[in-house]
Amino acid sequence: MKTPTHPDRTETRQAPAAKVSIRIGKRTTFDASVTTVGLLSVGALVSSILLSSAVIVAAAGRKAARRPLALPDHTKTDG
C-alpha cells in the first residue's frame, strides 16, 4: 500500500514571522527566525509557566498562614 503524498504540505513553506540577528564583537553573530506557529507555541508555554507559578505561590502563602513554622514563645515550658 502506497502512502499518499500531499504536494500542498511539501511544496509550500511558511515565511518567518520574526527574524532576529544578534552580533557580539566582530566575529560572532547569532541569527534566528520563528514562524507564526512557533510564536504561538512560545506564547502558550510562557503563559502556562506564569499561571502555574502563580498557583504555586498562592498555595504556599495559604499553607504558611494556616500553620506557623515554630511554636510561639509563650507555649514553651521551662523545666
Image (cartoon, grey):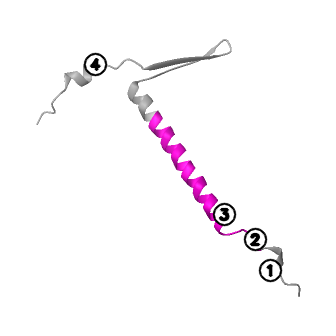
Q: Nearer the viewer, mark 2 or mark 1?
A: 1
Can you identify the residue that label 3 sits on? Answer: 64
- Estimate the x, y position of residue 3 in percent, counting from the top left: 16, 33
Can you identify the residue that label 2 sits on? Answer: 70
Q: Quadrant of the C terminus?
A: bottom right
In the picture, measured across the screen, residue 16 lies left or right of residue 24, that is left
Say which element carries label 4.
loop
In the picture, measured across the screen, residue 61 lies left or right of residue 37, that is right
Q: Nearer the viewer, mark 2 or mark 4?
A: 2
> Do callouts 4 and 3 mark residues in contact (Cβ within 8 Å)?
no
* Magenta highlight on residue 53: yes
The image shows residue 35, relative to residue 72, as above or below, that is above
Say which element carries label 3.
helix
Q: Earlier in the sequence, mark 4 or mark 1?
A: 4
Can you identify the residue that label 1 sits on? Answer: 75
Q: Which residues are magenta?
A: 43-71
